[in-house]
Amino acid sequence: MSFCRIFYLSFLNPKFRVLIYVPLVLFGSIWCSVAPPPPSYFSNTKNIINVYFAKLSFGWTATLVTIVILLSSYIYTNCNYKQVLKHLCRVVVVTAAWLITTSIFNVIRQATGRCSYPEYRSINNCTGSGGNWTDFDTSGHCFVMTYFSLLICEEVRIMCNWKALLDKLQSLQSLNESTLRKTMLQKKNVMLVTYILDIFAVISCILLIIWDLILLTTVMYHHTMVEKWIGGAVGIIIWFVTYKYWYRYPISPSLPGSGPYYSILSLPPK
C-alpha cells in the first residue's frame, strides 16, 4: 500500500473522520461530564490556539479552501473560467452555512438566556453590569471544527491523485502548439500550480491537526454535554447534505475535481 493511500485513509478520508468525531463528541462529552479533567493551559479560553485559530477559524479555512479550489480547478477544468467560478461557489456555500448557523446559535442563546439581574435581558448588558448569564449555548467550536475539518478533507484529498492527473496531461502533450496555447495548460503553468498546491496541502494538514486539537479541548473543558452534541451534529449534517448529496446534482457548485479528469481525481489513491 502506497504512502499516499495510507495517508488518505488515515487522515484525509472524511468518512474516517466522521467515525472518529461521532464517538469523540458523544462519549467524550459524557466522560468529561462525569469525570471532569483537571484545569490546564487549554481550559483557559485566552490560550494562543483559541485566540489566534479558533476565533479566526472561518478566516483560516475560507482562505485555504479558496486558494486550493482556485488553483486546482484551473488545472482540472482545462482553464475553463466559467467552471472555475462554479467551483468557487462552494466557498460561498461555506460562508452562508457558517453565517446562518452561527446566527441561529446566537438567537437560541439569547432566547433561552436569563440574567441574575432580572432587569437585564441581553448578554452584554448582563455581563457588563456584573451579572451572571445562563443560557443554552450551542457549541460553535464543535460545529466549526467538525464542519471545517471535513470541508478541508473534501477539497484537498484530490491531491492524492494529482500525480495521476499530471501523467494524463503528460500523455496529452501530443496536442499541437495552437491547442496548448488555447487551453493555457502549458507544462510550466501546471508545474507552478502543482508546486503551490503542494505547499497548501501541507498547510491544510497542519490546520487539520490544530482543528482536531481545538475539538478535543472543547469536548474536555467547555460547554454542556448536549450543547456539544448538537454543535458537532450540525457540522456533520451540513457536510453530508452538501458534499454527499447536493453537490452531486448539476444545479450545484459541483464536487471537487469535477471536470474532464474527474474519473482520475475521484478514484481512491493507489
Image (spheres, helix red, strand yellow):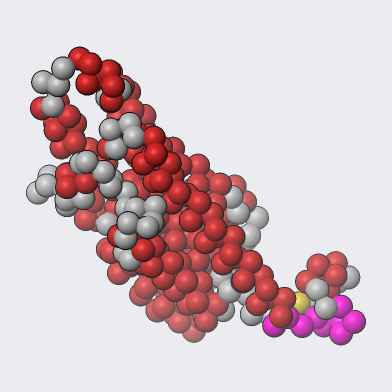
Q: Residue at x 11, y 20 (%)?
A: 174
Q: Quadrant of residue 68?
A: top left
Position of residue 219 in the picture relative to residue 176 (left or right): right
Number of numbered discs overlaid on the protein picture: 0
Q: Where residue 74 sits: x, y (%)?
A: 34, 33
Residue 215, position in %: x, y?
A: 47, 63
- Of 78 and 45, nearer the camera is 78
Q: Is residue 70 left or right of residue 122?
A: left
Secondary structure mostly taken by the magenta-highlighted segment of the chain: loop
Residue drawn 45% across the image and 49% down it: 89
Residue 131 spot, x, y in % from top left:
83, 75
Q: Residue furthest top?
A: 177
11 to 226, vertically: above or below:
above
Q: Is residue 119 magenta?
A: yes
Give the magenta part as a residue range: 112-120
Q: Looking at the image, can residue 47 be seen?
A: no
At a point 36% along the width and 63% down the height, the residue shown is 246
- Evaluate whether residue 147 shows in this view: yes
